[in-house]
Amino acid sequence: MAPASQVPEGTVLAAPDAESVVARLLELGDAENVLVVATDRPGLEAARAARLVLGGERLGLLHHPVPPTASFVALAALRMLPPVALGLAPALLAAVTHDSRTAALVSSVSALDKPRPTMSLDLASRLPGSVFRVDWTAQTVTRSDAIDLPVGIAAVTTASERPVRDVDAAAWGPTQIQLDTDGAFWGAKRWFEATVLLRPLEETVGALVRPDVVAAAHRCASCGRHVAGDLCVFCQIPVLSGAAPVHSGGHV
């Protein structure tokens, strides 16, 4: 549930209200496994309401409130998961975070809740010309005009019409993807945000879905799907060990 300009091609989109989410899910027909990814609180509440309306057995739910460029990368990775492994989505998101770096330069941090800036940085936001570096990966905020990201294999970027600083994304890798966003995530008038991939997504996904890794994964005692973490994304209940047939068919 995000603007079309912020998601990989082929991602099914819905506005963050229950009626829209239900309508888009019904368009998918009889797909057995559907993973709904909410990028903000309204989207999460809408997805939960949709599960109540349609029944939750075939609907997985993930809340992944990250910056737009990181969200784009996460959705691209999730779309590579085979249907039988959609329950492992939380582990994949953790792996993608490990294999990428996200940071932003913003003109103000007054509206920033996460990571929370210090009071002195909040006050500095009121000074003309201030620039702040938000390291989303490390969850830190500093007063700096250098985004300081490592060289990788690809960069996903987004910026305001007048970015806080001119940044050469080509320095981060041979592939660049530019997103059109409104900056609402940062709450600043001027911003530049980037996520740099350090490893091909195919390798990150491949490492998670190796036969030996999947075979060793826990199963949800209720629905039988593979699970990662403490909560089954399909049942939304704490994970207990158990065995059940593998489900197939799905969408992200």
Image (tube, rainbow, N blue to C red):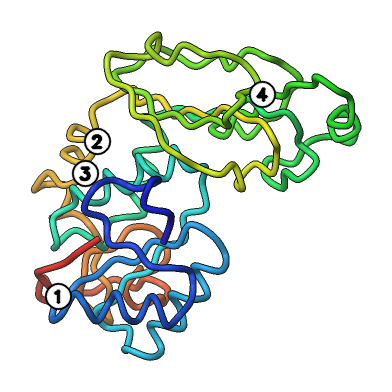
Q: Earlier in the sequence, mark 2 or mark 4?
A: 4
Residue pointed to by mark 3: 208
Q: Residues at badges 1 and 2 in contact (C-beta under 8 Å)?
A: no
Q: Percent position (x, y) of residue 194? A: 48, 27
**Cα gap from disc 2 to disc 4, whole angstroms:** 27 Å
Query: Considering only order in the chain, which callout, 2 or 1, is on the residue closer to the N terminus?
Result: 1
- Numbered disc in front, either 2 or 4: 4
Corner quadrant of residue 123 = top right
Please state which amino acid type lies under the numbered disc 2.
Thr
Tag nearer the camera, 3 or 2: 2
Give the residue pinned by disc 4: 133
Mark 4 element type = strand
Q: For the residues marked 1 and 4, what is the alpha-carbon distance in whole angstroms?
A: 43 Å
Q: Which residue is mark 1?
A: 31
- Whether residue 130 is situated above or below residue 20 in the rendered picture: above
Q: Position of residue 49 (x, y in %)?
A: 46, 83
Residue 110's x, y, as percent? 80, 41
Q: Residue at x 27, y 14 (%)?
A: 174
Residue 48 relative to residue 244: left or right: right
Residues marked 3 and 1 touching at CB (< 8 Å): no
Residue drawn at x 52%, y 53% is 65
